[in-house]
Image (cartoon, helix red, strand yellow):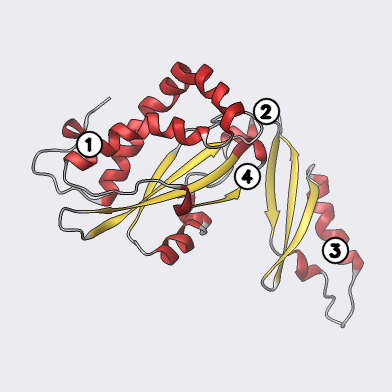
């Protein structure tokens, strides 16, 4: 694993994007190593203190990085803390919490914001995926919350198309955003046969309708089907 001084060249201008990449470098190298080394301790603490155990785990991974940032002249206090976070996504076994930390230079001028995505279980101690760090140019709380709530920013285009890891779990998913177009027959009445036509195309290809929700002036339909086996 590269240290801070190995990752950045001596005369290199350090940006918030570069700092996020360094965090990501350390996480990729260390998250599983620390998980394996301390699993027994973390399992025990989960039953003693509950969800705060993930803070203990993250400290083991990230505190050395924060020390390097401080030595390089950057201010990150108070770091990734619970009040600067939201947790809106995922099932209990794979909850996602986003925590943020504004980074400032030696003069106190904000450089940008680091956002840490933490994946964790509420059922037992488990970190199902590597934590993920990305950067934002904005530094005000409301702007940070708006950015994190935007899926295209939060996911950073990582899961465009079908996420292969999800496919191997047995199901794949898709959406139809034009379902509501079939509900208006153009004569002021609902024409059921049009809707049958739309849904039949999905059914012929093995898709099961899971739910339908309104979004703006559209109806969004969610479908799933067993992963298709090649051959």
* Vertical side of 93 occupied by 42: above or below: above
Characterize the local packing of mark 3: few (<14), some (14-19) or many (20 or more) Cα atoms within 10 angstroms. Answer: some
**Label 2 near label 4: C-beta < 8 Å?**
no
- Which circle, 4 or 2, is nearer the viewer? 4
Q: Which mark is residue 195?
A: 3
Quadrant where the N terminus sits is: top left
Name the residue rendered at 53%, 17% in the picture: 40
Quadrant where the C terminus sits is: top right
Name the residue rendered at 28%, 39% in the picture: 66
Characterize the local packing of mark 2: few (<14), some (14-19) or many (20 or more) Cα atoms within 10 angstroms. Answer: few
- List x then y, in percent, for residue 125: 58, 28
Earlier along the polypeptide chain: callout 3 or callout 2?
A: 3
- Number of residue marks: 4
- Which circle, 3 or 2, is nearer the viewer? 3
Q: Which residue is mark 1?
A: 68
Q: Quadrant of residue 229?
A: top right
Name the residue rendered at 34%, 61% in the picture: 139
Q: Does any portion of residue 125 appear in the rendered image? A: no
Front-most of residues 101 and 193: 101
Earlier along the polypeptide chain: callout 4 or callout 2?
A: 4
- List x then y, in percent, for residue 198: 81, 59
Earlier along the polypeptide chain: callout 4 or callout 3?
A: 4
**Label 3 near label 4: C-beta < 8 Å?**
no
Left or right: 7, with 30 as reference point:
left
- List x then y, in percent, for residue 188: 87, 83
- Which circle, 4 or 3, is nearer the viewer? 4
* Vertical side of 57 occupied by 73: above or below: below
Left or right: 120, with 34 as reference point:
right
Q: Which residue is mark 2?
A: 230
Characterize the local packing of mark 1: few (<14), some (14-19) or many (20 or more) Cα atoms within 10 angstroms. Answer: some
Q: Residue furthest front?
A: 48
Q: Does any portion of residue 77 appear in the rendered image? A: yes
């Amino acid at each position: 694993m590269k240290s801070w001084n190995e990752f950045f060249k001596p005369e290199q201008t350090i940006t918030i994007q570069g700092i996020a990449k360094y965090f990501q470098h350390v996480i990729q190298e260390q998250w599983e190593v620390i998980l394996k080394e301390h699993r027994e301790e973390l399992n025990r603490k989960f039953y003693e203190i509950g969800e705060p155990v993930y803070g203990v785990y993250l400290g083991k991974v990230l505190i050395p990085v924060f020390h390097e940032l401080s030595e390089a002249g950057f201010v990150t206090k108070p770091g990734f803390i619970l009040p600067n976070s939201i947790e809106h996504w995922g099932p209990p076994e794979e909850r996602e919490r986003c925590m943020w930390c504004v980074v400032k230079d030696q003069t106190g001028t904000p450089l940008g914001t680091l956002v840490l995505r933490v994946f964790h279980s509420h059922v037992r101690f488990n970190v199902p995926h590597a934590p993920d760090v990305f950067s934002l140019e904005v530094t005000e709380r409301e702007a940070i919350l708006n950015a994190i709530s935007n899926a295209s920013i939060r996911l950073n285009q990582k899961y465009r198309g079908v996420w292969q890891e999800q496919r191997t779990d047995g199901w794949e998913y898709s959406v139809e955003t034009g379902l509501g177009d079939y509900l208006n027959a153009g004569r002021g009445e609902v024409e059921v046969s049009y809707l049958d036509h739309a849904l039949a195309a999905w059914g012929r290809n093995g898709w099961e309708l899971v739910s339908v929700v309104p979004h703006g002036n559209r109806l969004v339909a969610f479908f799933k089907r067993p992963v298709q086996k090649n051959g």
